Image (spheres, rainbow, N blue to C red):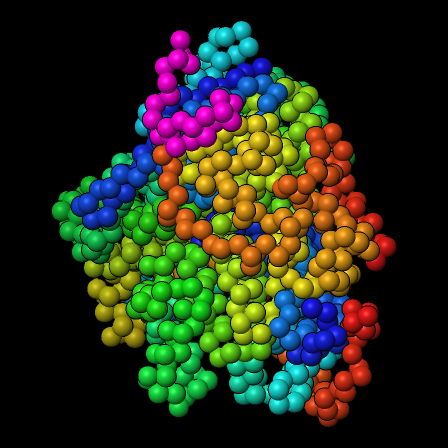
Amino acid sequence: MTSVKITDLVKDYTLRSGLKRTRLRAVDHVSLELTPGRTVALVGESGSGKSTIAKILTRMERPTAGTVDVRLDDGTPVTNAHYRREVQMVFQDPFASLNPFHSIEHHIARPLKIHGRTKTQDDTRARVLEMLERVNLTPAEAIAPRRPHELSGGQRQRVAIARALAPGAQVLIADEPVSMLDVSIRLGVLNLLGRLQREDQLAVLYITHDLATARHFSDEIVVLYRGRVVERGPSDAVILDPHHDYTKLLALAAPDPERPGRVTSEAPVDREAIDNSTCYDHFKGEWTEAGVPARSESKA
Amino acid sequence: MTNLKPTSEPSVADSAELLAETSVETGRKPRAGWRMLVPTMTPWLAIGLGLIAAITLFGLIGPLFVGDPRTIRDMGLTPPSGEFWLGTTQTGQDVLAQLAYATRGSLQIGVIVGLLATALSAFFGIYGAYRGRVVDEGFSLFTNVFLVIPGLPLVIVISGFVPAESRGLWTIAIVLAVTSWAGSARVLRAQTLSVRNRDYVAASQVSGERPWRVIVVEILPNLLPVIASQFVFAVISAILGEAGLSFIGLGASNSSTLGTMLFYAQNGFALSLGAWWWFVPPGLIIALFGMGLSLVNFSIDEIINPKLKNLRLHRKRARRAARLERELAQASRRNGVPSQQAKPNQDKEIAR
Amino acid sequence: MTADQRQAVLTVDDLTVVYETEEPVTAVKHADLVLHKGEILGLAGESGCGKTTLAYAVNRLHRPPARIASGRITFHGDDGDTDILALDDAELRAFRWERLSMVFQGAMNALNPVTTVRAQLKDTLLAHRPRMSRKEIRERSEDVLTRVGVDPRRLGSYPHELSGGMRQRVMIAMAMLLEPQIMIMDEPTTALDVVVQRDILREIVRLRDELDFAVIFITHDLPLLLEISDRIAVMLDGEIVELETADRLYREAKHPYTRKLLGSFPSLSGERGAFIRTGVDETTEDSTVATAKERA
């Protein structure tokens, strides 16, 4: 079991146009904690910085400032060499995240071999089949030699989940894992993630723009707006009792068949007017400043 | 769905997938990824392969059956006969024997240059694009410099600069390779940039794959058709380039190629003497070999872009569909507009 | 707003569309559909169910090897009925856009990047109304942009200077330029953010109320359809398996596939439904659809 503590994460991108350089702050002092057996949903629109956080967590990008502290159960920090064994990711598009050239077996066997989970060829094969069965891809023997294009979107995403879990990962980052899938199979994939999480006591970061699944799938919701956290709290509290204007806007924008005809009755909100300088924290029950270093009391 | 990415530009990787899908449609299950990189046999491909095989075979085993091409006989220029199938040169040398050795020499140059140029372009194109940032910028600049260096003049200058006695086969091969890899490197760089940004490359990096493995195992297979096509192209241009160099007397000094044959034919006034058997055979071999390689290249193009392959089939189907539809439209016009009573039942159900 | 009070503008009768491939694939099977004046008809279904093919065929925009194998599409205009399948090419060109226009999937990337919005609106107008004066064109262009909520000063902008939502609005403006009686919208908001999506939907519903055109709205997002449309057709494997008013479809869906689709969307404010973290329903992704197909 592994937990992750992100403190004051900042990521700046430099945009170059001609000789002029402008700095774009994609993530602004975001702090998060992922603990075993809990799901945190990171909610926001595109460009809010949620994918940047995923990239930093998977070490595809370096943060400009701030720390990502990954510790095992007994408090020992995870070394760089073991980082990728502990933290894994499921990508958004299952049609792009599997190499069309390789078999399903290759995709799962590689992480097993890289992280020394298996020693012999037979061992690896048995383990691959076991992983496929865990994600409900049966008969595993028939699935393993196939190539990605022979599987449906939902099946591919299951393979991607199996690949992420193959190194024995304890922290899973799921970047919009179902948004590219057909609606009728989304639930199945999310429920699978939920089951694996309970079985392995995984710490999950669920990145999404879909408030409804965020509410039902996660324990805690963190709302990101223009790089800053503007609201955080238990899922139901954030969705049913939003405090920040942006969260309210999101909740309003999500389709809700329980309330038909809303579309015309409500006046449009001027989005430019919404600021991201404050954050409502449902745990503390108070407004705090957003985009500033976390108060030192948590460190003490 | 906020994060829908715009569909990325088409590339080889897409076509590999597309190809695999079409093979599923036809009921054939590709077992390994490699299988789909083999072009399907078409008459054109067969002709191309046949030409290449015949000429290669001639170059490989021909020299074993002919006499010494350098033997000088006291018979002057003679047309083809029973003894000398392709006649003799001004100094009585057997043209067929010369042709066999020259073909071998040209093939050697072609293959060596092809391999060297492909290796250079793969290194500078793929590795640079994969590493990105400074490495990519540096490699790009380097490639661009080589791209704008005028190839043939440089070759002439270098060949002229190197003294004739040390101007061996390898010197020529290296000169030709160095001046011809840059274009391919740019194409490979573009393709790599496109493949590199795919999620599966990111996914394998996240799984902890080492960079060289990501390049060789995840990226390279998707570029193979392009590399193969560029290799074939490099071989053609190397053979032609060498022939050109030899023709102007700057070729390898100690080897005989199709180009040197033409050079001697030109010097011996073969054309004005009407000795067609001296210059036509080497010219023909160059032309046929180039044609064979080009035909193979077209087949590789079909792998890179499967649309080419299905174009004719697609057109046929489209014509059929259009015809059938026209007939329906005509029938519909004859019968006139349907009356309002012909509304579907569903409508009544709703109206209820 | 019941259907019988309204006049039909489009009748699709027994429409079958076949793809002439090696083994012909029937993409749309005997579809029957009536679109009423001023109605928003939702067309829901998952990828590959034939909803886009159906929409294209109605407009005869489908490309070979797709072909209409049977059926009849009738447009009921103010000046009498038109059999769309019997139109020749010139008539068809005049019919499209003038009577029936379309907003394509990913349409916001369909604007020509090298000319201004003004030029593109003008081209469309001149193609159909060659005798329009410059002043009329300017007034009409400004009018449609204002209607879709884009500042008319944006007329001089190039597409890349506009945001995604804005481009989509321009596309809708373009579709309503000639005041068609029907607009077909194929996933018009899929690539947009939820908040922007909501703004555009609001605009579409408002315009419909103002101008009384009929809309066929295609999407995979059933909750969205439930909110904005009057009636909804659910498609599965080329067949319309259920056609109901939005309210009835939500309360008492008859077809098992419709019920499954409805169950797939956890409700934001309501109960968790099938979506609870019990681990059930994981394996049924293909089998349920299969049973739904069998029963259909």
B177 in relation to C103, above or below = above
* Left or right for C228, reference C105: right
Q: Residue at x 34, y 74 (%)?
A: C119
Which quarter of the image is occupied by the C terminus of chain A? top left
Q: Nearer the viewer, residue A290 or C112?
A: A290
Q: Residue at x 65, y 86 (%)?
A: C82
Query: Quick check: can you spot residue A216?
Result: yes
Q: Nearer the viewer, residue C146 or B9?
A: C146
Residue B67 within the segment the image draws in magenta? no
Q: In the rendering, at what x and y percent does residue B268 appear?
A: 23, 65
C55 in relation to B205, above or below = below
Residue furthest to the right in view is C295
Query: Quick check: can you spot residue B53?
Result: no
Residue A284 within the segment the image draws in magenta? yes
Q: In the rendering, at what x and y percent does residue C176 appear?
A: 49, 74
Q: Nearer the viewer, residue B31 or C60?
A: C60
Q: In the rendering, at what x and y percent does residue A19 appear?
A: 18, 46
Q: Residue at x 37, y 24 (%)?
A: A8
Quarter residue A111 falls in: top right
Q: Residue at x 15, y 51 (%)?
A: B157
Q: In the rendering, at what x and y percent does residue A73 appear?
A: 55, 10
Which quarter of the image is occupied by the N terminus of chain A? top right
Q: Nearer the viewer, residue A179 or C69?
A: A179
Q: Which residues are magenta?
A: A278-300
Q: How many marks?
A: 0
* Left or right for B207, reference B134: right
* Left or right for C13, reference B209: right
Quarter residue A141 falls in: top right
